[in-house]
Image (cartoon, rainbow, N blue to C red):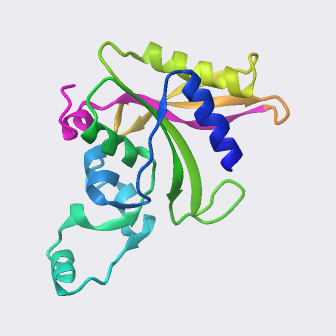
Amino acid sequence: LNVVTDELTELFGRMGFSVAQGPELEDEFHNFIALNIAASHPARDPLDNFYVTLDTGEDARASQKAGAQEHALLLRTQTSTVQIRVMEKQKPPIRVVIPGKVYRPDTVDDTHLFQFHQLEALVVDENVTMVDLKSTVMQFVHAYFGPQTKARFRPSFFPFTEPSAEVDVWFEDKQRFVELGGCGMVHPNVLRACNIDP
């Protein structure tokens, strides 16, 4: 896993991305609220997350009972939490790649684990378009999987991007497309949550 992470971050480094890291124990503000994920969204269901209670005394328990939602702690469900942390500290232009472990209480099978790895990239600058995003993704696909590799973009929905897409890569040996991941332009509400003018 470390070798693959190093290969991927080095590849993105050649495209001008620096590496960003963030905590695996996260608060709801960074994991949900700043990412435009509404309180009613199914991803916020307590059964779909690993919430953590720290026994730090009466003040913490009182705060949790009072419903201080954005301070509740959980194991991060996505590396997008680091995007928020980067945008809070750094103003555009931003060009980072974010590798890391994420946690979801999925049923373990051949495509799901309760702890797995993600790698995502973030670009925030003036005049960045879906053409730039697609070009970057295709540059990555061809550099990592080979210059003849076919990929497709399918419209999708993520609360933190608009427009959004899923990217699939064709695997000749499997004779099918396999999902590589999601992508999209950073949603204006996410930029506003980080005090960046959309």
Residue 174 falls left or right of residue 89: right
Residue 129: % across, % down: 38, 15
Residue 193: % across, % down: 20, 41
- Which residues are the magenta region? 176-198
Report the number of discs.
Answer: 0
Residue 32: % across, % down: 31, 52
Residue lying at the far bottom of the rendered structure: 58
Q: Quadrant of the C terminus?
A: top left
Please check the rendered image and state whether residue 191 is part of the magenta-colored stretch, yes or no.
yes
Residue 117 falls left or right of residue 172: left
- The quarter holding residue 40 reads bottom left
Which of 45/129 is in front? 129
Residue 159 visible in the displayed image:
no
- The quarter holding residue 39 reads bottom left
Which of 118/169 is in front? 118
- The quarter holding residue 71 reads bottom left
Residue 51: % across, % down: 38, 70
Please check the rendered image and state whether residue 195 is part of the magenta-colored stretch, yes or no.
yes
- At 24% from the left and 30% from the top, the residue drawn is 188
In this rendering, is residue 19 above or below 76?
above
In this rendering, is residue 45 above or below 170?
below
- At 29% from the left and 16% from the top, the residue drawn is 126
- At 45% from the left and 50% from the top, the residue drawn is 78
Which of 165/33 is in front? 33
- At 41% from the left and 44% from the top, the residue drawn is 80
Residue 131 visible in the displayed image:
yes
In this rendering, is residue 124 above or below 113?
above
